[in-house]
Image (spheres, rainbow, N blue to C red):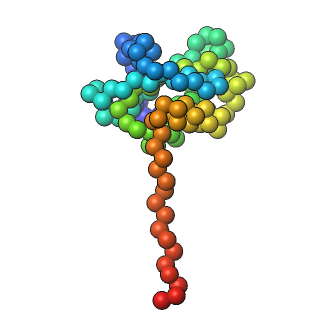
Amino acid sequence: MDRSLRLRDEWAINDVRRRGRAFSSGPLVARVLAIPDRSPTNQYAVIAGKRVGGAVERNRCKRLVREALRELHPRLRQGHAIAVIVRGGPNELTGKDVAVEHLTRIFTNARLLESRQPAETPPPDAST
């Protein structure tokens, strides 16, 4: 995920955690806060506490979530600060596909996922 899309300030992350609406699915919890005046795009923070495991396990879970966010970012409505909290360990978050599945469910419940279908051009009519 691009660094410009990250929430880096501690006060901003705490603000999202305090005032944002919570949505959960499996080992992930997302706090979502609308911030149309601060940024025209979404900003993300991925948080994993010590209950997740050692440093290696925490960093792996955070990398998987960041990759899933990078994949889902173009399909999300913009103008929100999103803090994703990992509460399950590597046993529950086994791969990027699992992270994408849980985040898709979270963003659907939060009504952030736009249902953009790829524009398909119809095949040319062969009867002419």
Looking at the rendered structure, the number of numbered marks drawn on it comes to 0
Q: Is 116 situated above or below 49?
A: below
Q: Position of residue 55 (x, y in %)?
A: 62, 15
Q: Is residue 87 left or right of residue 124?
A: right
Residue depicted at x 61% and y 10%: 50
Comparing 17 with 7, the one in front is: 17
**Quarter of the rendering containing residue 33:** top left
Q: Position of residue 19 (x, y in %)?
A: 40, 15
Comparing 28 with 5, the one in front is: 28
Q: Is residue 1 left or right of residue 78?
A: right
Residue depicted at x 36% and y 26%: 34
Which residue, as the protein is rendered here, is positioned at the far bottom? 128
**Quarter of the rendering containing residue 112:** top left
Comparing 108 with 46, the one in front is: 108
Which residue, as the protein is rendered here, is positioned at the far top? 50
Q: Is residue 31 visible?
A: yes
Q: Is 41 situated above or below 7?
A: below
Q: Position of residue 78 (x, y in %)?
A: 37, 36
**Quarter of the rendering containing residue 43:** top left
Residue depicted at x 43% and y 34%: 2
